[in-house]
Amino acid sequence: AQSVTQLGSHVSVSEGALVLLRCNYSSSVPPYLFWYVQYPNQGLQLLLKYTSAATLVKGINGFEAEFKKSETSFHLTKPSAHMSDAAEYFCAVSRGGGADGLTFGKGTHLIIQP
Amino acid sequence: ETGVTQSPTHLIKTRGQQVTLRCSSQSGHNTVSWYQQALGQGPQFIFQYYREEENGRGNFPPRFSGLQFPNYSSELNVNALELDDSALYLCASSLGGRNTEAFFGQGTRLTVV
């Protein structure tokens, strides 16, 4: 079965600082990995996805993530945090097999300090 | 191109009652998935429908059931509501396939009292 672990339920960074949100996965099949963002009282929006084409994936709003098979990781980064980045971030892995759908981590709440 | 829309946005039900939540998928999408997001948690996969057939299910009891219609819209039905069913219910539509993007609606906030 596929699973995702997000390290750190809350991460606080200063505006302009590097953002690093950690995600480790477990998958019995080659994984498809996703990062989603959720703003208060809203649904989820896709930031980026890894589908085996390239290990460094660039997404929207300046975010990127690197797939490292040896570390089973897919950490999300952004060089310079902006106040508008404050939100909940979820890492997810495709469930695989004949059924689609995603298995999500518990989420990381990103706080941006002015 | 219209996005994924869910209705209602909020509702309150009494324990033991039944509820139906609705989802209109994004234009052209034939796959709909439903997720339950408890407060402070990540979404949990309930089930998925592809061309009107359920083709995947998470760890949810049979009192959670669904339908998908020929226009690919979908319903989630929950019978015998329990207090723990209180959550944000999210619908997502996609073209199907493990690597395709799922587009999420804004969710229905269900409160069971």
Image: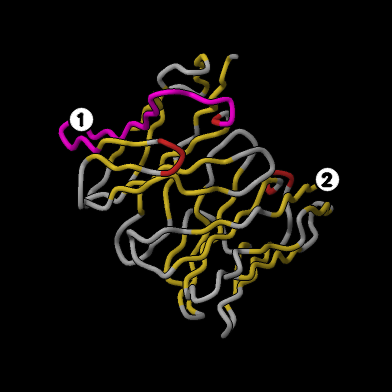
Which residue is at a point 56% across and 54% down the rendered structure image? B35
Color theme of the render: secondary structure
| The N terminus of chain B: image quadrant | bottom right
Q: Residue furthest left?
A: A70
- Quarter of the image for residue A73 reads top left
Q: Is residue B65 above or below residue B72?
A: above
Q: Nearer the viewer, residue A52 or B58?
A: A52
Same chain for labels 1 and 2? Say yes or no: no
| Amino acid on which disc 1 is placed | Glu
| Amino acid on which disc 2 is placed | Val
Query: Is residue A1 at all visible to an observer of this figure?
Result: no
Q: Is residue B92 above or below residue A37?
A: below
Q: Chain of mark 1?
A: A
The residue identified by callout 2 is B113
The residue identified by callout 1 is A71
Q: Nearer the viewer, residue A42 or B31?
A: A42
Q: Is residue A110 left or right of residue B85?
A: left
The magenta segment is A67-84
Which residue is at a point 43% across and 23% down the rendered structure image? A80
Q: How many marks?
A: 2
Label 2 SS: loop
Callout 1 environment at 10 Å: few (<14), some (14 to 19), or many (20+)? Answer: few
Callout 2 environment at 10 Å: few (<14), some (14 to 19), or many (20+)? Answer: some
- Quarter of the image for residue B84 reads top right
Q: Nearer the viewer, residue A28 or B23?
A: B23
- Does the residue at mark 1 contact the one at mark 2 (Cβ under 8 Å)? no
